[in-house]
Structure formats: structure tokens, C-alpha cells
Image (cartoon, rainbow, N blue to C red):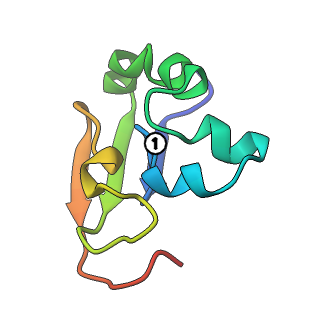
Amino acid sequence: MRVKRFVTICASHYGTWVAYFHQGLGCVQMRPDSAFLQDLNRNTAMLKQLSFASIITPYDMMSILAKSSQLPVGREVGVSVLTHD
């Protein structure tokens, strides 16, 4: 295994409704329940082998809904910031 630690920051693991505003490939892939995201999330159990943390904020207006940043494994770190960047 090459990765020991993995940290995501406000990542929309389950997509974002904002992606419906554009037709580009990246936006299509980030739509909720897209084939791309289903493929990425198919093996989230393997993250148990890593030191994994997901940094989220309930105020992120890009990752709508904020729960799309939450995964069922690893440590979740909530921060109170008002912007995505």
C-alpha cells in the first residue's frame, strides 16, 4: 500500500446539486448518483485501512447538501467556515 493517510476537504463524495448548472464533463460527473461517483464510492470500506479524515463544514454552498461530504468511514472533522475556498 502506498497511501497511509488520506484527507479530504469539503469533498462532495456523493455529488452536488450545483453540478446541474453546467453541462461540462466535470459537472456531469459530480452530479448526485452519477456513474463516476458510484464507481469512486464503491469501495469506501478500503479506507478503513488508512488514517482517513474528512474535513467538512455545514455551511459549504458548493457541497449541497453538506452530508454529501460525509463518508461512513474514517474521522470527520467539522469546521465552521462560510465559504468553500
Tell me residue 58's x, y (percent): 23, 68
**Is residue 19 positioned above or below 32 on the image?**
below
Tell me residue 36's x, y (percent): 60, 25
Q: Observer-nearest residue: 4 or 41?
A: 41
| Disc 1 packing (10 Å; few <14; some 14–19; many ≥20) | many
Q: Is residue 71 left or right of residue 39?
A: left
Q: What amino acid is found at the position of numbered circle 1 in the picture?
A: Gly
Residue name at image x 33 percent, y 46 percent: 68
Residue name at image x 27 percent, y 45 percent: 70
**Is residue 73 positioned above or below 60 on the image?**
above
Q: Is residue 26 left or right of residue 14?
A: right
In the picture as drawn, the residue positioned furthest to the right comes out as 24
The mark total stands at: 1
Tell me residue 76's x, y (percent): 23, 52
Q: Residue under label 1, please give it.
A: 15
Q: Observer-nearest residue: 31 or 82?
A: 31
Residue name at image x 31 percent, y 83 percent: 81
Q: Is residue 70 left or right of residue 8?
A: left
Q: Quarter of the image for the C terminus: give it.
A: bottom right
Q: Observer-nearest residue: 83 or 9?
A: 83
**Is residue 61 positioned above or below 52 on the image?**
below
When asked about the image quadrant of residue 9, the answer is bottom left
Element type where label 1 sits in the image = loop
Q: Quarter of the image for the N terminus: give it.
A: top right
Residue name at image x 46 percent, y 42 percent: 15
**Is residue 10 positioned above or below 14 on the image?**
below
Tell me residue 82's x, y (percent): 34, 85
In the picture as drawn, the residue positioned furthest to the bottom comes out as 82
Q: Is residue 7 left or right of residue 23?
A: left
